[in-house]
């Protein structure tokens, strides 16, 4: 049988790698992808705990429902985030470095 | 370690390695495709955890929509050349130390749970229906005694069960959907409102400069002008 550790550690690893990516990268698109990694780590842990509590059957589905909500919110976030990046790159001549974007405001 | 654990571990290692490549690769297109690999790995782990519906949704929404959107924008706007666009002052050390700190904190928090074997999903027989589930007769009184699918002969062979076993019940579309609609109907409706607002928000965000003739910064028009001048 499977043990919980693999999935919990994978979710934790995905979250940490995503956090490192958010802090490390300055390209706005990379930030978006790193945030997706963090969301996936949290989702995986939710699904793992829902599976671990499969004995209490109807209530364990709350974890799956939460993951569904998070996935839809993440899709919305990606769409709006990419729209923001495109709008930003138009006004800043293709520069989407999140550190230098604020320096040209005068 | 049996073969099932080995499979899950191999998939987890692949997922972690591609997640690292998402963060560390210099070309954004490579990062996007490693992100696709990561999301597919997570979908496989969902399927291993009996969350079949979520695995399909993960592939549909993430691999089918989000990654395609990112790759589309990358190829259209050409953001991929940026690569490492500078760091915070001493940013690498700060990022690595904060990430490792969160990793250690999470491992400490999860430490009490590690090592616990995952029990198989229980098989619910009619004699030991779990507490909280309606009994089959309460669930479908109209179907009791009636011959299932009498009006649909091609379905007559399919045995209809009012109470599927928990093993096949767990994570199926029917169970997740029933729980979602009955317990969280407001959230279900709010998601549709959120999607509608996102559509309108994206249109409002990207509409303005297109209509203004003074700004020549719109990518579509500038690219069209350059191609026509060539």
Image (cartoon, rainbow, N blue to C red):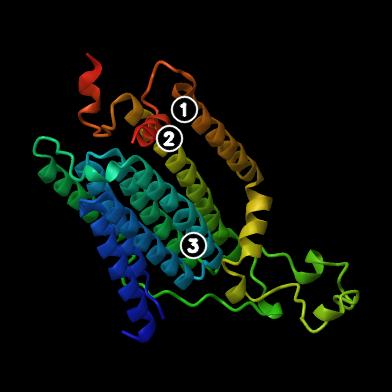
The secondary structure type at the circle numbered 1 is helix
Give the answer, above or below, for where B129 lies relative to A34: below
Q: Are marks 2 and 1 in contact (CB under 8 Å)?
A: yes
Question: Total of numbered circles in the picture?
Answer: 3
Q: Residue at x 28, y 58 (%)?
A: B19
Q: Label 3 crowding class (10 Å Cα cut-off): few <14, some 14-19, many 20+?
A: many
Query: Which residue bears the numbered disc 2?
Result: A83
Where is residue B172? Give x, y as percent. Answer: 60, 67
State the separation of the CA atoms marked 2 and 1.
7 Å
Q: Earlier in the sequence, mark 2 or mark 3?
A: 3
Picture quadrant where residue B3 is located: bottom left
- On the image, the x and y values in percent for residue B12 come to 32, 69
B88 is higher (above) or lower (below) than A47: above
Q: Is residue A92 above or below residue A105?
A: below
Residue B84 lies left or right of residue B72; in this view the side is left
Disc assigned to residue A50: 3
**A87 or B227: which is nearer to us?**
B227
**Residue ID for mark 1:** B205
Tag 3's secondary structure?
helix
Residue B90, compared with residue B40, is above or below; it is above
Q: Nearer the viewer, mark 2 or mark 3?
A: 2
Please give the name of the residue rendered at 21% of the width and 49% of the height, measured from the top-left corner: B99
Query: How many other residues sit within 10 Å of disc 1, few (<14), some (14-19) or many (≥20)?
Result: some
Q: Quadrant of the rendered structure where residue B152 is?
A: bottom right
Query: Chain letter of disc 1?
Result: B
Left-right relation of B23 to B45: left
Q: Quadrant of the N terminus of chain B?
A: bottom left
Task: Chain letter for mark 3, please.
Answer: A
């Amino acid at each position: 049988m499977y043990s919980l550790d693999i999935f919990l550690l994978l979710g934790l690893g995905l979250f940490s790698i995503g956090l490192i990516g958010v802090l490390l990268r300055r390209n706005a698109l990379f930030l978006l992808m790193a945030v997706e990694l963090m969301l996936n780590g949290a989702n995986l842990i939710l699904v793992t705990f829902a599976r671990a509590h499969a004995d209490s059957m109807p209530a364990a589905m709350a974890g799956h429902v939460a993951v569904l909500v998070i996935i839809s919110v993440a899709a919305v976030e990606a769409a709006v985030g990419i729209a923001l990046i495109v709008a930003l790159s138009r006004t800043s001549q293709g520069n989407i470095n999140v550190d230098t974007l604020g320096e040209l405001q005068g | 370690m049996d073969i099932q654990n080995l499979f899950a571990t191999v998939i987890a290692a692949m997922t972690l390695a591609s997640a690292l490549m998402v963060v560390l690769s210099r070309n954004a297109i490579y990062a996007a495709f490693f992100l696709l690999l990561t999301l597919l790995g997570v979908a496989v782990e969902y399927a291993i955890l009996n969350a079949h519906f979520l695995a399909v949704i993960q592939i549909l929404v993430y691999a089918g929509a989000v990654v395609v959107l990112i790759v589309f924008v990358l190829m259209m706007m050409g953001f991929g050349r940026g690569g490492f666009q500078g760091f915070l002052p001493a940013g690498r050390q700060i990022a690595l130390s904060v990430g490792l700190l969160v990793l250690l904190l999470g491992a400490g928090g999860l430490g009490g749970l590690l090592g616990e074997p995952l029990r198989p999903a229980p098989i619910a027989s009619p004699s030991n229906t779990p507490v909280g589930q309606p009994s089959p007769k309460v669930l479908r009184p109209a179907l009791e005694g009636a011959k299932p699918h009498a009006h649909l002969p091609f379905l007559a062979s399919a045995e209809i069960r009012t109470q599927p076993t928990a093993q096949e019940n767990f994570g199926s579309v029917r169970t997740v959907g029933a729980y979602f609609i009955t317990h969280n109907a407001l959230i279900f409706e709010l998601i549709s409102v959120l999607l509608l607002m996102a559509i309108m928000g994206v249109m409002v965000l990207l509409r303005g400069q297109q209509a203004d003739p003074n700004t020549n910064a719109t990518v579509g028009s500038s690219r069209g002008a350059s191609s026509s001048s060539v």
